[in-house]
Amino acid sequence: GVVSRKGYMGVKAALDLLGREFHIEPTVKPRKSAALHPARAGQVWLGSKLLGEIGEVHPDLTRRYKIPGQLGYLEISFDELVAASGDVKYQNISRFPSVHRDLSLELKDSIAWEKVKEVIEETGLGRPRFLSDYHGKDLPAGAKGLAVRIEFSSTERTLTDVEADQQLSQVLKALERKLGAKLRS
């Protein structure tokens, strides 16, 4: 297991690192737990195989036991992780530079990063990367901010800013249509 003083983001970063190192893409499916934060708790899956749990200790518990800050929690079956990594498959990458766009989205607090990632990947236009999430007083009740970096590329040429912005616009429309997400100002 992994415990992080950086809360959910710390253990999510550790999970992402494990995914990269073992060449797998685990997903987190939300799960309710009395011991974990209601919006930051889930089970870690790889396809139909349960690998473990991830979350942030519920603020009521950290206050009760006088634990300062946020406390992240990740438990993964190492044997399942190694077995799942299997053979590594490689694909050609573009020899042309990619273009990155960072987004700051506002969406319902109940929508997990994995769902946002899935919607972006379904467009077939870019590769998303989680940057951070934000819960603050300047957001409506039940909403969160989510920062995402999307990498756009072509195997034929370097994309122009106009082309990257057009692809970004399509991604934003998909996020708005499927998740009700909107750009934060």
Image (cartoon, helix red, strand yellow):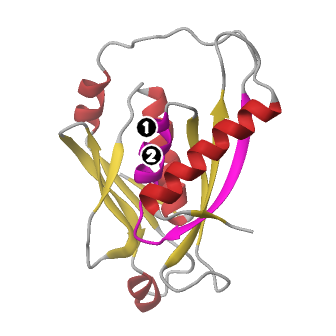
Residue that numbered label 1 is attached to: 122
* Residue for point 38% across, 29% down: 24
Magenta stretch: includes residue 96? no
Relative image position of residue 157 (x, y in whole percent): 74, 12
Query: Few, some or many C-alpha atoms within 10 Å of disc 2 (few <14, some 14-19, many ≥20)?
Result: some
Magenta range: 99-123
Looking at the image, is 93 positioned above or below residue 147? above
Residue at 81% from the left image edge and 33% from the top image edge: 161
The residue lying furthest to the bottom in this view is 64
Disc 2 designates what residue?
Answer: 119
User: Is label 2 in a helix, a strand or a loop?
Assistant: helix
* Residue 113 belongs to the span the image colors magenta: yes
Are the residues at dot 2 and dot 1 in contact (C-beta closer than 8 Å)? yes
Report the amino acid beneath label 2. Answer: Val
Viewer-closest of 110 and 169: 169
| Residue 130 visible, this angle | no
In the displayed structure, would residue 144 be above or below residue 99? below
